Image: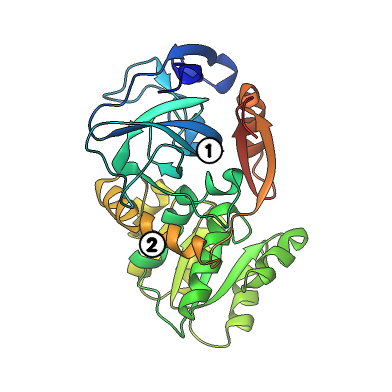
């Protein structure tokens, strides 16, 4: 390993609490063992889950907790007899990785199976935000059995998960009516969806746009309005999914998914390579609203927590190009 990455800066949660209580510390990066690689991080994806998962005590997890699940960067060391998720790897290769621990870092050693060759069509900031949103979107389409020619309803269509749903649905010939604000309607339209403004009268507006049955509903926002509209428009509750309204899902008998659920984790792991290939072919893009220096992680998370960043957010270590 290059001596300059023997030590790296990491964000950790020393105890349960908000990002303002986290610490930015220098740590020794362990040399990779068999089945591991060390990555110089060029960008780390910023997601609401990064803060949510250390906000309060979780069973089986003890602080300090290294923060960050998604990265893009350059391989600087490889354990013996090791390949990555997409195959052979060499020092200097650019990779993306998802479902890692401690991605808010300038360098990190990770399980090699979690890394895939970085799509050359994406910048590091874009690539670092491809897989969490992309695998979530893919699972939402899969569990609702969305099929070519069907019309589906997507709540939160202009957000990160929503934009990936729109792109993946378009590739399959699935028609999407997507909720958004008036200001974000152009984003939905730009990715092949039919925008509809949320708020009073949503159900009737969707019915008019659909001109036929709504086969499935995908909720990426978790509001009561989203769930109520889905129940009113979709006959089969087994074709309604949420990634946010877990209480309503239990009460109403609809599907809820999350990366912490074993079935969701398996699906998302299996679909990573396919999504990376789609991005390499130019069929999946990742809108990035803003980048922050790695040292500014709390500010980046504050922007994301506001709910309307206008695209994905990435952290850039100081020594990145």
Against 166, residue 43 (above or below) is above
Against 133, residue 98 (above or below) is above
Mark number, residue 229: none
Mark number, residue 274: 2
Q: Nearer the viewer, residue 112 or 52?
A: 112
Q: Identify the residue shown where x is 60% and y is 54%.
A: 159
Residue ID for mark 1 = 48
**30 relative to 262 in the view: left or right:** right
Dot 2, crowdedness within 10 Å: few (<14), some or many (≥20)? Answer: few
Mark closest to the chain's N terminus, 2 or 1: 1
- Which-is-in-front pick, marks 2 and 1? 2
Element carrying mark 1: helix
The x, y position of residue 115, in whole percent, is 37, 43
The x, y position of residue 30, in whole percent, is 34, 19
Question: How far, Cα to Cα, is label 2 from label 1?
Answer: 24 Å
Q: Identify the residue shown where x is 25% and y is 46%.
A: 262
Q: Identify the residue shown where x is 70% and y is 50%.
A: 310
Q: Quadrant of the N terminus?
A: top left
Dot 1, crowdedness within 10 Å: few (<14), some or many (≥20)? Answer: few
Element carrying mark 2: helix
């Amino acid at each position: 390993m290059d001596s300059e990455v023997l030590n790296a800066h990491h964000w950790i949660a020393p105890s349960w609490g908000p990002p303002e209580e986290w610490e930015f510390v220098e740590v020794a990066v362990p040399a990779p063992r068999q089945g591991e690689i060390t990555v110089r991080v060029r960008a780390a994806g910023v997601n609401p889950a990064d803060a949510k998962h250390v906000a309060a005590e979780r069973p089986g997890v003890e602080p300090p907790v290294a923060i960050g699940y998604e990265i893009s960067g350059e391989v600087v060391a490889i354990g013996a007899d090791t390949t990555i998720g997409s195959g052979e790897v060499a020092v200097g290769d650019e990779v993306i990785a998802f479902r890692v621990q401690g991605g808010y870092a300038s360098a990190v050693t990770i399980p090699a199976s979690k890394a895939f060759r970085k799509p050359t069509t994406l910048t590091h900031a874009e690539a670092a935000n491809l897989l969490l949103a992309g695998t979530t979107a893919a699972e939402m389409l899969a569990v609702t059995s969305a099929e070519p020619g069907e019309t589906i309803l997507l709540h939160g269509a202009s957000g990160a998960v929503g934009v990936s749903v729109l792109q993946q649905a378009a590739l399959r010939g699935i028609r999407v009516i997507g909720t958004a604000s008036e200001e974000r309607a152009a984003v939905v339209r730009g990715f092949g969806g039919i925008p509809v403004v949320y708020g009073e009268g949503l159900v009737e507006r969707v019915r008019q746009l659909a001109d036929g049955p709504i086969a499935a509903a995908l909720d990426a926002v978790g509001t009561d309005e989203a769930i109520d509209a889905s129940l009113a428009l979709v006959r089969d509750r087994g074709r309604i999914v949420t990634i946010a309204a877990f209480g309503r899902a239990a009460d109403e008998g609809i599907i809820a998914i999350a990366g912490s659920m074993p079935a969701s984790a398996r699906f998302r792991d299996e679909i990573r390579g396919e999504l990376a290939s789609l991005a390499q072919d130019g069929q999946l893009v990742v809108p990035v609203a803003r980048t922050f220096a790695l040292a500014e992680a709390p500010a980046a998370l504050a922007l994301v927590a506001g709910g309307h960043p206008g695209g994905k957010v990435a952290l850039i270590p100081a020594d990145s190009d």
